[in-house]
Image: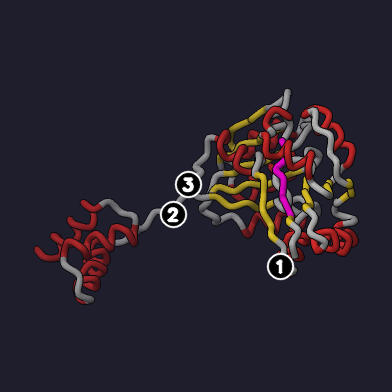
């Protein structure tokens, strides 16, 4: 196929975040598949862009029904620009089915990257971001939501969720029950918009705050489970070092390997080896 599918990163709230590449893509695409036509026209007006291509809706309820027509346009060599309401298509937004179908049909799939609520919330949360996981929207039903959160109680990475403002208080209370009242978190509301707000604190305190009512787009960031301390006797530590040495490691490398495996200070492991040697 000679066509091209372009995934456009729409602004979270501020039109000024849009770069010249997305402006050009909006103006020149043969087909614009958009989650909400009203938002497209509002964004185009804010950017002083006049889309020349055909505009079709592409939201959750029509996503699969639109595939044949969009694939046909791509087969004819046209450029299709996919825009969802905010952030990148496919990330808890429509898009995956079209991307997968286009790839399977041999269509070039590219992007004009833009803002993402996931990484934006992580950056401002004040929580560790060296490792994180995105969990999307929590289940709407209370029992399913609690089950999902219970299953994540041991997750060591920082977690990111999307949540409805109407369910936020219940979700925070359920998270506090699953993760502990004191687990640190951040509620990021209306990111990049006029009324942006980031509330940071323990889950229980955030649940109490949210019980008063919250409005706007919500991204929730929750700290990962703390590492459980390793409890080993000096004799057990010395045995681990001896096992590494028996496998061919030098004493120095054996101690280093046990430090990495246990997370204990090097001095603790070294003293255990010395104590075992002297006994």
**Residue at horizontal 77%, vertical 61%?**
97
Can residue 6 be found in the magenta stretch? Answer: yes
**Front residue (pair 15, 157):** 15
Q: Position of residue 74 (x, y in %)?
A: 80, 60
**Residue at horizontal 48%, vertical 46%?**
130
Q: Position of residue 36 (x, y in %)?
A: 87, 43
Range shown magenta: 5-11
Q: Kindly state the secondary structure of the residue where label 2 is placed.
A: loop
**Residue at horizontal 72%, vertical 35%?**
12
- CA neighbours of label 2 inside 10 A, class few (<14), some (14 to 19), many (20+): few
Is the residue under label 3 in contact with that under label 2 (CB below 8 Å)?
no
**What residue would you read off at disc 2?**
228
Whether residue 234 is visible here, answered yes or no, is yes
Mark number, residue 106: 1
Whether residue 137 is visible here, answered yes or no, is no
Q: Quadrant of residue 13?
A: top right
Viewer-nearest of labels 2 and 3? 3
The mark that comes first in sequence, 2 or 3, is: 3
- CA neighbours of label 3 inside 10 A, class few (<14), some (14 to 19), many (20+): few
Q: CA distance from mark 2 to mark 1?
A: 48 Å
**Residue at horizontal 63%, vertical 30%?**
199
Mark number, residue 130: 3
Q: Kindly state the secondary structure of the residue where label 3 is placed.
A: loop
- CA neighbours of label 1 inside 10 A, class few (<14), some (14 to 19), many (20+): few
Q: CA distance from mark 3 to mark 1?
A: 35 Å
Q: CA distance from mark 2 to mark 3?
A: 19 Å
The mark that comes first in sequence, 2 or 1, is: 1
Quadrant occupied by the C terminus: bottom left
């Amino acid at each position: 196929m000679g066509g091209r599918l372009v995934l456009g990163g729409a602004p979270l709230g501020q039109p000024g975040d849009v770069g010249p590449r997305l402006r050009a893509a909006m103006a020149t695409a043969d087909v614009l598949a958009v989650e909400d036509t009203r938002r497209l026209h509002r964004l185009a007006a804010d950017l002083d862009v006049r889309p020349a291509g055909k505009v079709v809706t592409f939201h959750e309820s029509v996503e699969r029904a639109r595939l044949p027509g969009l694939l046909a346009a791509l087969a004819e060599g046209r450029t299709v620009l996919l825009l969802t309401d905010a952030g990148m298509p496919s990330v808890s937004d429509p898009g995956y089915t079209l991307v997968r179908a286009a790839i399977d049909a041999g269509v070039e799939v590219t992007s004009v990257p833009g803002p993402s609520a996931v990484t934006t919330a992580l950056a401002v949360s004040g929580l560790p971001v060296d490792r994180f996981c995105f969990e999307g929207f929590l289940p709407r039903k209370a029992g399913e939501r609690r089950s999902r959160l219970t299953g994540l109680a041991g997750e060591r990475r920082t977690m990111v969720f999307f949540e409805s403002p109407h369910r936020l208080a219940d979700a925070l209370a359920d998270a506090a029950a699953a993760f502990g009242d004191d687990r640190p978190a951040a509620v990021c509301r209306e990111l990049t918009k006029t009324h942006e707000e980031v509330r940071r604190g323990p889950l229980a305190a955030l649940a109490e705050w949210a019980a008063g009512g919250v409005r706007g787009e919500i991204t929730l960031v929750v700290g990962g489970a703390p590492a459980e301390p390793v409890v080993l006797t000096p004799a057990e530590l010395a045995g681990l070092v001896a096992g590494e040495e028996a496998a061919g490691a030098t004493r120095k490398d054996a101690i280093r390997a046990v430090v990495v495996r246990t997370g204990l200070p090097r001095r603790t492991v070294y003293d255990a080896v010395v104590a075992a040697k002297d006994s």
